[in-house]
Image (cartoon, rainbow, N blue to C red):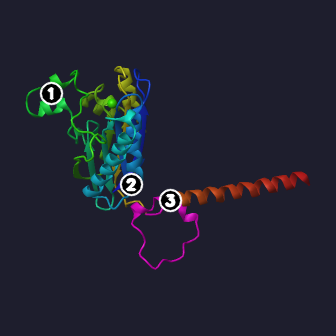
């Protein structure tokens, strides 16, 4: 089992001046954050959370590890709010998905009203339960799902990242199946486009992640684009888990054998960046030599 194609798109929408959504797309890790707070605080909150998740220590791919990433995001946003009075009360939603290709599973971590969906066969399933006032009212039977649609208080969330010193994170694990398409999105999509229409759009896009992302954002904007719209789409396909080392890095000379066992793949991000940098330097060297040869032959 492995991650197939991935796509992300974040759009300010048609009514907001700023985009307060942020996302992380660093397979096997994906996340989305929708910030809230006065002035630019929402933007700061979502970016701080995304940065904390992207750069967080990845001890593993389990539920505890995912919860720990969200708690790190909480600590980062909360600390900033405490240290900056103008940012007091800021917070953000966070929805994280981490794919364990070897185990064939997807772990979701979630706080707030951004959502994770999965399209499998002919069905779209909302995987996360919104931590919102309206969703709580629906769950307790005091509001029907129909009444919830377009409810004036639908954006009131009951749980957020960064508003308290600690946060309660929902986590769960799903089995990954070939052909699954996962979608993480902010409420700027789901307030504008119904679940049935999300599935319709995904089908119309041939379930190709780039097209799905683009067409979903277009649909939300066509419906009014009241809020920022962010989507992260990835598919699960058959095949061997991706190798620990990206192909590009194979251009590097083999490293000196190390006495200790190699670090697990999730810790290899630094090495990956170094590999890319080395590959770029190698490419530049080839171009430089080619230019020298041309210059030399012209000079002759
Ligand atoms: Ca929003």
**Secondary structure of residue under mark 2:** loop
Which corner quadrant of the image does residue 231 belong to? top left
Residue marked by disc 1: 145
Q: In which quarter of the image is residue 287?
A: bottom right
Number of residue marks: 3
Q: Mark 1 or mark 3, which is nearer the start of the sequence?
A: 1
Look at the image and tell me whether residue 246 can be seen: no
Residue 256: in magenta span: yes
**Mark 3 or mark 2, which has the lower sequence index?**
2
In the displayed image of the protein, which residue is found farthest to the left? 141
User: Mark 3 — residue?
Assistant: 272
| Vertical side of 12 occupied by 293: above or below | below
* Nearest-to-viewer mark from 2 and 1: 2
User: Circle 2 is placed at which residue position?
Assistant: 56
195 up-or-down from 152: above or below: below
Find numbered disc 3 in the image and state the secondary structure of the residue it sits on. helix
| In the image: residue 258, left or right of residue 181 | right
Q: In this view, does 226 lie to the left or right of 169?
A: right
Q: Element under label 1?
A: helix
Magenta region, residue range: 244-269
Q: Is residue 96 magenta?
A: no
Task: Compute the Cα span from label 3 to label 1.
Answer: 46 Å
Q: Residue at x 22, y 24 (%)?
A: 153
The residue at the point 42 percent across, 53 percent down is: 55
Query: Does the magenta stretch mainly form a helix, a strand or a loop?
Result: loop
Give the position of the N terminus as an image quadrant: bottom left
Ligand 1 quarter of the rendering: top left
């Amino acid at each position: 089992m492995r991650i197939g194609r991935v796509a992300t798109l974040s759009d300010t929408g048609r009514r907001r001046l700023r985009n307060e959504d942020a996302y992380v797309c660093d397979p096997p890790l994906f996340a989305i954050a929708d910030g809230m707070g006065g002035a630019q605080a929402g933007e700061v909150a979502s970016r701080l959370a995304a940065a904390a998740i992207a750069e967080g220590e990845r001890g593993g791919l389990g539920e505890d590890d995912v919860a720990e990433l969200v708690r790190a995001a909480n600590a980062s946003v909360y600390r900033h709010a405490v240290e900056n009075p103008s940012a007091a009360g800021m917070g953000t939603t966070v929805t994280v998905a981490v794919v364990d290709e070897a185990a064939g599973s997807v772990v979701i971590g979630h706080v707030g009203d951004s959502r994770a969906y999965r399209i499998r066969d002919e069905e779209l399933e909302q995987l996360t339960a919104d931590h919102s006032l309206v969703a709580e009212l629906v769950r307790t039977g005091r509001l029907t799902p129909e009444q919830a649609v377009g409810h004036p208080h639908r954006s009131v969330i009951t749980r957020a990242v960064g508003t308290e010193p600690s946060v309660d994170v929902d986590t769960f694990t799903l089995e990954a199946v070939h052909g699954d398409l996962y979608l993480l999105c902010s409420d700027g999509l789901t307030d504008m486009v119904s679940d049935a229409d999300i599935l319709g759009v995904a089908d119309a896009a041939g379930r190709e992640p780039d097209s799905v992302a683009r067409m979903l954002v277009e649909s939300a904007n066509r419906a009014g684009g009241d809020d920022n719209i962010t989507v992260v789409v990835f598919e699960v396909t058959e095949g061997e888990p991706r190798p620990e080392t990206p192909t590009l890095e194979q251009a590097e000379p083999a490293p000196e054998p190390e006495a200790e066992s190699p670090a697990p793949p999730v810790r290899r991000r630094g090495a990956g960046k170094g590999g890319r940098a080395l590959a770029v330097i190698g490419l530049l060297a080839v171009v430089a030599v080619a230019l020298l040869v041309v210059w030399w032959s012209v000079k002759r």
